[in-house]
Amino acid sequence: MADDLHSPYVGRWVARLRGKIIAQGNTPEQVLHASQQSHHKERPEIIFMFPLPPLVKKVLDILPAAQEIYLVGGAVRDAFLSRPSYDLDFALPANGISLARNVANALGADFLALDGERDTGRVVVTAEDDSRTFLDFAVYRGAGLIEDLRGRDFTINAIAYNLRDETIIDPTEGGKDLRAKVIRACAPTSLSDDPVRILRAVRLAASLDFHIEKNTRELMKQSTSDLGRISPERLRDEIFKMLGGPKPDACMRALEMLGIFPYLMPELSAMKGVTQSEPHVYDVWTHTLSALDYLDQTISALRVGYDAEKTNDMFTGLLGLRLGRYREQIAKHFAEPLNPDRSLRSLLFFATLYHDVCKPETKTVEDSGRIRFFDHDEKGAEVAAERLRSFNLSNDEIEQARVIIKNHMRIHAFADRLERDKQTPSRKAIYRFFRDSGKAGIDLVLFALADVRATRAHALTVESWTVYLDIARILLENYYEKPEEVISPPRLLDGNTLMKELGIKPGPIVGQLLESIRENQAAGKIETLDQALAFAREELARITS
């Protein structure tokens, strides 16, 4: 066991002879060959110097010394790939729930009896920064560990690490597939046993930059129709992990090619091949995939610590120069999810995936040949909301996605006005934009930048891109630097005061007057209570005349 996480051998294979390391390398074969160069007559012990997380060591200290226990699944895979893991799965012969409860009590962590039938317990450890690590304790599925591993999804996830004698158990040769960057099913029935693994294969391929082995792809296609028997929650979790991870566009393209959408998100299928007028370069579906890709690039270029010098893309370089000062605020925005189980980033990508979902049904062709999509934004917002309800997302998440899709054309209108008439958004327009979108206004800014690149692609000019960056800067500047002036001016009076001063009764007109006062505060036209009352009297006279 690698006790020193900073040891040069951690995460590598080594050859050990009489307690001394005589060779090291990236593969067992490489290490054995190297060791034989100097000790050709002796047979060293070939071991992997497992980078054991400190939390695992705490678990071992809590459990009885004789407890048989293995680290399995993604944590072992990620250790081989030198990747951090926040999901630690433990396999043991019995008492999964009771041992998990003991560990949770000792760590002062949360406990959940995850699956009573399979005797699986979960421990949730929350760090000071609110990040969470999940520790699942499950009894073997089958007669023992080997049968348990062979029954898992993919070979790269079917490797176990014996926490007692520090050995690797790899019955399906997942180590070789890790080195070859291959995703391979453990058995011919792996996908039909649990069809959600089809989605997991796509997600893993994108997140690890691996390729799916040919026979496994065929097994995936054969089991696609079985996705209908999977719970909406499990399907949702895989989809949102894809959207929140690397290469969301490639994931969605793979799902479309596998014919999965009819069983998962059937409304997306209609977008393919739907043509659009200029300035659109692509059909609706290709545009949507491109928007996902450009959104990924946009968020990446605005992350804290991004090295702008590494890009050779002029548009990305300009993005960093114009909006780079908001990196920390954008990072904070995405760090405050509406649900602890899903990122705000993944919700924005879902909204992007659905932003043009109603273009097929709203498509009209004018006599001039121009193609229009009237109300596709408002109708699309409701279709997306319905899909999210079927996935059992929270009301807050559904509303956030609905707001993004409903308002996704507004920044384009701002940009058109600036490009055509050299007119920047007024303070009142900025107030109204954030009044209607709230915190989702930040998502809309990022989305609009991705959307215009996906719309015009190679035809986008530096001049037009600069216009969009100017609009984005104006909106972010007002939101982050002038919130009390423009975004949320302090209330000068409430409804009771207004009714008393104007001698009016409760009704919709009270709310209308209060909102008009706030809009004019944002515009800089009202600053005092007297001005607010004077404006209200004039407005009331105009409305009732």
Image: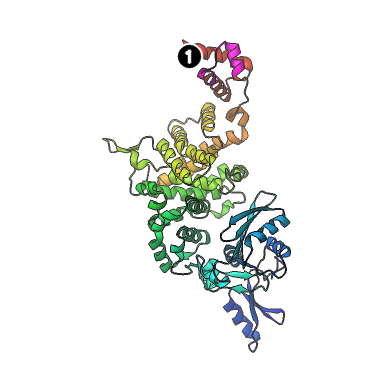
For the view shown, which residue lies furthest in the front direction? 117
Q: Is residue 343 magenta?
A: no
Of the pair 395 and 278, the residue shown nearer to us: 395
For the view shown, which residue lies furthest in the left direction? 367
Give how far across and how far down residue 448 sits, in percent: 48, 41
Please, what is the dominant secondary structure of the magenta stretch? Answer: helix
Q: Secondary structure at mark 1?
A: helix
Question: For mark 1, what is the residue?
Answer: 543
On the image, which quarter does residue 142 sit in? bottom right
Does residue 367 sit above or below 309 in this rendering?
A: above
Q: Is residue 496 magenta?
A: yes
On the image, which quarter does residue 212 sit in? bottom left
Of the pair 431 and 224, the residue shown nearer to us: 224
Give how far across and how far down residue 375 sits, in percent: 38, 35
Does residue 20 sit above or below 192 in this rendering?
A: below
Residue 86 at least partly seen: no
Residue 401 at least partly seen: yes
Q: How is the image coloured?
A: rainbow
Residue located at (58% from left, 71% from top): 145
Quadrant where the N terminus sits is bottom right
Q: Mark 1 packing: few (<14 Cα in 10 Å), some, or many (20+)?
A: few
Task: Name the amino acid type tagged 1.
Answer: Ile
Residue located at (28% from left, 35% from top): 366
On the image, which quarter does residue 526 sit in? top right
For the view shown, which residue lies furthest in the bottom direction? 41
Q: Is residue 79 rendered to the left or right of residue 355? A: right
Magenta stretch in the rendered image = 495-511
Give how far across and how far down residue 341 sits, in percent: 57, 49
Of the pair 51 and 165, the residue shown nearer to us: 165
